Image (tube, rainbow, N blue to C red):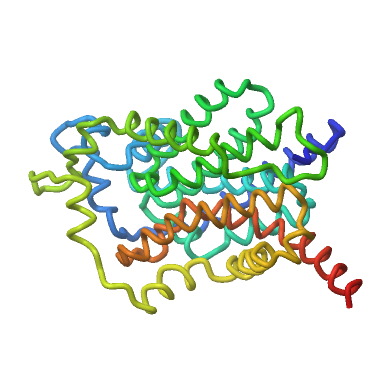
Amino acid sequence: MHPPSAPADRRADRIVAVLLAIGVLVAYTATTQGRLWGDGPEMLRLLEWEGRPWWRTWAHPLHTPLAAAFAKVAPLERAHDAFVLASSVPAALGTGACYLIARTLGAGRVAGAAGALLVAASPVLWYFATVLEVHATHAGVVAVCALASLALAPRLGPRAFVAVHALLFGVVSLSHLTAATLVPLWALLGSFASRAFASGRTSGAAPRVVSRATLVHGAAAIGAYALAYGIAQLTHHRFAAADPRGGSIADLVLDSIEPFSIGYFVDDWIEPLSWSLVPFGLFALLWALPRTRRALEPDARAFGAVALVGGFFPFAFYAAWSLPNDGGYAAGLLPFVAVTAALFRPGARDAARRWCSAS
């Protein structure tokens, strides 16, 4: 890890992260949309639907209590605005968190801010942060929890860190039901964090990402996910709709599978992530080629394995599902896109030097 050594640098980074979050939140709130999209109508019905508690009526439990909290503390005219704030505020906080993660992994201030802002300004995150939906909340929670895990890793023993890392994934799970697809990524992140901070780590060596610890973190994440939702919620959920019938999550997925097409790939991945895919794709190219991979900093190289290998699993699931969602299902991967985008510049510079010296 590469945390800034001087206290003044750490304070400066925190100030930059706060300013990024505030600036992004101002931009989001200034462009809040009044329209309802996707599950928006059903989410509004949660306010009155049969008087049931929010955790028994909605499959993404964290969003509704956040909205209720904003409705109590902010002078809002419409319940709709509180629900949108429950998306825009986590997304803005996630922007600051992505900057701090990138700085921890060795990115410069400009590169860290650029990577975070590229994703914050991407069509997918800007859209879902300004409309009544849960995807931006999910992206922000993933970023903040990932930052918390990296910050706590050097302060905890191995067993305590496994428990805390799993607990943080429980919070991630509550932000969106599809967090189950992030289990491999979260397991790799836990293994990376625990080894990156290991006291016996060889200087200049990339921490191992795939190890026995990965399996331990994966099992703990699965347990946290199940605990977060409970057996009843996993086996029989009811959305806040007039239809009184319930159904299993497996039925929900199987009944909505669409055939894969290039159009789905473009509409739900290329266009929504837009320009943020350029540095991410270039970083992936650097990481994939053995000769240029060595040009990346050890922590950046290992984090690339977390983002690219771990991110493959949710991407493969959504490609097989192919349910159109305007890019919303990419939300859990957006923080990793932001951080790898920030890490691309120094890696590209060193790779160019290696190629020039070899030629």
Q: Residue at x 71, y 30 (%)?
A: 198
Question: Is 165 positioned to the left or the right of 63 in the image?
Answer: right
Q: Could one spot residue 85 in this view of the protein?
A: no
Residue at position x 50%, y 60% from top?
126
Task: Give me the residue at 55% from left, 34% from top.
Answer: 213
Q: Hey, which quadrant is residue 304 in on the image?
A: bottom right
Task: Please indicate, yes or no, whether residue 268 appears anywhere in the rendered image.
Answer: yes
Which quadrant: the N terminus? top right
Q: How many marks?
A: 0
Q: Is residue 233 left or right of residue 138?
A: left
Q: At which x and y percent is residue 146?
A: 57, 40
On-image quarter of the C terminus: bottom right
Q: Quadrant of residue 110?
A: bottom right
Give x and y (percent) for residue 205: 77, 44
Say if 200 sits above or below 237 in the image: above
Residue nearest the viewer, comparing 275 with 160: 160
From this viewpoint, which residue is outermost toward the left?
A: 244
Q: Quadrant of residue 308?
A: bottom right
Give whichever of 33, 319 is nearer the camera: 319
Query: Which residue is farthest front?
Result: 212
Q: Nearer the viewer, residue 301 or 42?
A: 301
- Residue at coordinates 52% horizontally, 56% vertically from top-left? 30
The image position of residue 24, as x and y in percent, is: 60, 52
